[in-house]
């Protein structure tokens, strides 16, 4: 499972790894090389996230505004029109009549 980190958290991890690497004995072992390569990857991904973040956020806000604020056509109903027979006075009939009223509006 992937746990997303904030840019501040990524920067802290990156700087900590780079700071520690200054004290590592040379030549580096496989784990240490992997840590430095991961730090480089963190820097690259963080730069891409920061560069694209404002555009992605603006697109999200525009899409959300369109979904919440712009009028949409009424959905087509599949219920038959209310018939003119005597009203059903049972609880189920009352619920059905209420649903038909909501759908009609």
Image (tube, rainbow, N blue to C red):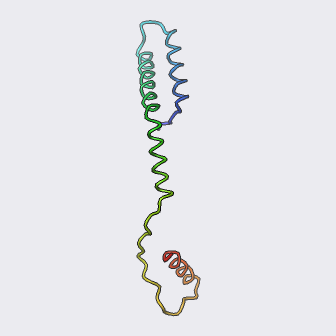
Q: Position of residue 41 (x, y in %)?
A: 42, 24
Going by the image, does 98 lie left or right of 81? right
* Residue at 59%, 82% in the rendered image: 91
Image position of 2 with respect to 93: above or below: above
Foreground residue, 1 or 67?
Answer: 67
Image height of 95 relative to 28, above or below: below
Residue depicted at x 53% and y 23%: 13
Left or right of residue 87: residue 47: left
- The answer to which of 65 and 33 lies nearer the viewer is 65
- Count of numbered tags: 0
Residue 6 in the image: state x and y as whole percent: 53, 33
- The x, y position of residue 87, in whole percent, is 54, 90
Q: Residue at x 41, y 7 (%)?
A: 27
Report x, y in % for residue 73.
Answer: 43, 67
Q: Quadrant of residue 90?
A: bottom right
Q: Is residue 67 above or below residue 14?
A: below
53 vs 35, nearest the viewer: 53
Which residue is farthest front? 70
Task: In this rendered view, identify the residue nearer to me: 47 or 40.
Answer: 47
Q: Residue at x 47, y 56 (%)?
A: 67
Of all residues, the one furthest to the bottom in this rendering is: 86
For this orientation, the residue located farthest to the top is 26
């Amino acid at each position: 499972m992937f746990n997303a980190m904030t840019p501040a958290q990524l920067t802290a991890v990156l700087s900590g790894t780079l700071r520690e690497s200054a004290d590592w004995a040379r030549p580096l072992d496989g784990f240490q090389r992997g840590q430095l390569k991961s730090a480089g990857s963190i820097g690259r991904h963080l730069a891409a996230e920061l560069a694209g973040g404002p555009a992605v956020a603006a697109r999200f806000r525009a899409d959300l505004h369109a979904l919440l604020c712009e009028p949409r056509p009424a959905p087509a109903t599949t219920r038959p029109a209310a018939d003119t027979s005597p009203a059903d006075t049972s609880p189920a009939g009352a619920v059905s009549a209420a649903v038909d009223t909501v759908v009609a509006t």
